[in-house]
Amino acid sequence: MKTDDKMLSAYVDGELDATASLELEREMAQNPALRASYERLRQLSAAVREKAEYYPSPTRHKFAPATRSRWLWLAPAFAFALVAGFGLGFFVSQPGEDETTSTEIVASHVRATLANRLVDVVSSDQHTVKPWLSSRLPFSPTVVDLSGDGFSLKGARLDYIGSQPVAALVYQRRQHVIDVFVWPAGKEAVKTAYTRDGFNVQHFARGGMRYWVISDLNKNELDDFAKLLK
């Protein structure tokens, strides 16, 4: 059993001291998967307490061998159910590839914005941006000029997603920055759109490339942008 699993079990049973409990609560606040695992364990533990057949401790004069045998059989069965249920819940709650990538995309977008390092090459000319990226990456991303549609190209930067180098194309719509992360894809994928941490995110794969689009621009306009990009 992993250390986190042991700590969660101890936390549910009220066996952690105040310092360890506070540290675990802080970690759960920052880790949705760990928090989901705790909720599953807590619910399962409550269900076991509620549904399990408990037998009063008999006196030495009235102890029934059959009752003792039944409890000795039930105890390990419930313990196994508790461990198996928690293990399955922890496995299911692990973030998938898209969720992990989405987390990195949002973090990279926020980091570049706060550090005021949105572009490494400043240019609205796609014929300047594309060669700059191609000379620094093991692939050549497509760069399109969408200024005629109200989405101006501001430049690009190099970034890393999933420990691999990617191209980050930067567009602007009024005061809204749009990051487009591009890297090679093994197969095509239909567009997926959702909101994460206050940002609208879309991703799809086409023409041998994977595209992740993120911005605080409203969903409708970002959807228009993604359609133009495709």
Image: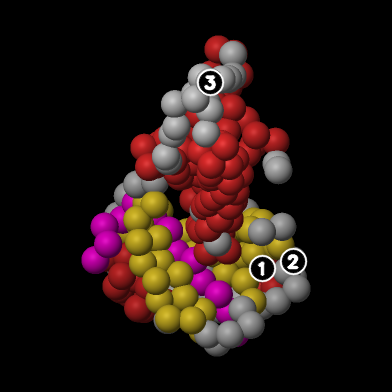
Confirm whether the magenta stretch covers residue 216: yes
Q: Is residue 52 above or below residue 21?
A: below
**Amino acid type, label 3:** His
- Any part of residue 75 in sight: no
Relative image position of residue 17 (x, y in whole percent): 59, 14
Query: Taking 36 as reference, is 219 left or right?
Result: left
Residue closer to the observer: 25 or 142? 25
Query: In the displayed image of the protein, which residue is found farthest to the front?
Result: 61
Question: Which label is found at residue 133?
Answer: 1
**Label 3, label 1: how many angstroms apart (C-alpha)?**
85 Å
**Residue 8 higher or lower than 137, as above or below:** above
Q: Which residues are the magenta region? A: 208-220
For marks 3 and 2, the one nearer the N-term is 3
When the figure is inspected, residue 185 is found, relative to residue 217, above or below; the finding is below
In front of the other: 87 or 202: 87
Identify the residue under disc 2: 136
Where is residue 215 drawn, in percent x and y? 39, 55
Q: Quadrant of the C terminus?
A: bottom left
Which quarter of the rendering shows the N terminus?
A: top right
Are discs 2 and 1 less than 8 Å apart at CB? yes
Q: Which residue is mark 3?
A: 61
Q: Look at the image and tell me whether residue 63 can be seen.
A: yes
Give the structural element (helix, strand or loop) at label 2: loop
Q: Nearer the viewer, mark 3 or mark 1?
A: 3
Label 1: state its secondary structure: helix
> What residue is at 35 percent from the left and 61 percent from the top?
194
